[in-house]
Image (tube, helix red, strand yellow):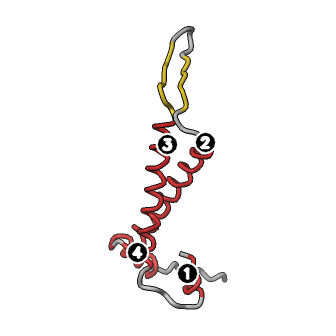
Amino acid sequence: MYYYYTVSTIGIHPWWKKHLTGLQIYQFVSGVVYTAVYFYYYFKDVQISFDSVLPSISFKTGCTGELWAVGFMFFVNNTFLILFSQFFMQSYSSKGKNSREKSRNETPEVKKRS
């Protein structure tokens, strides 16, 4: 990815940009799946009891690690997955290209002040 950015800044546009974006989307999907599996195994033997008015939930942790870190990773991977998927659809699908070309061809009128 950084090689692509480096060569793009000097004016070279590699043919494999679309494939790189696809690999990044795959990376974020794997991260989402990994964190979902982690959450599944983290909350082991979940028990809900109704001793009082409010229910209480207890569980044994099945995995080690910080839950907040995995939650943050889940949030980041989902965010990047959405953003990169939108970029991929806008850049490489025929529908996204057509709407982008239309907006380029339409130039707004500028009114001159008298």
Q: At x 55% / y 8%, what residue is drawn? A: 51
What distance separates the C-alpha of mark 1 from that of mark 2? 33 Å
Where is mark 1, residue-wise?
3
Give, as a three-letter code, the residue at label 1: Tyr
Q: Whole-percent x and y of residue 19?
A: 40, 74
Quarter of the view holding residue 66: top right
Q: Whole-percent x and y of residue 99?
A: 39, 72
What distance separates the C-alpha of mark 3 from that of mark 1? 32 Å
The crowding category of the residue bearing disc 1, from other C-alpha atoms within 10 Å (few below 14, some 14 to 19, many at least 20), is few
Q: Which type of secondary structure does the marked residue at label 2 adopt?
A: loop
Q: Which type of secondary structure does the marked residue at label 4 adopt?
A: helix
User: Does 74 sit left or right of 68 as displayed?
Assistant: left
Q: Residue furthest top?
A: 52
First in sequence: mark 3 or mark 4? 4
Q: Which type of secondary structure does the marked residue at label 3 adopt?
A: helix
Give, as a three-letter code, the residue at label 2: Gly
Q: Can you say whether 102 is above or below 44 in the image? A: below
Q: Whole-percent x and y of residue 15?
A: 41, 85
Where is mark 4, residue-wise?
19
User: Of residues 33 and 102, which is closer to you in this image?
Assistant: 33
Q: Which type of secondary structure does the marked residue at label 1 adopt?
A: helix
Q: Are marks 2 and 3 in contact (CB under 8 Å)?
A: yes
Where is mark 3, residue-wise?
38
Q: At x 59% / y 80%, what residue is drawn? A: 111
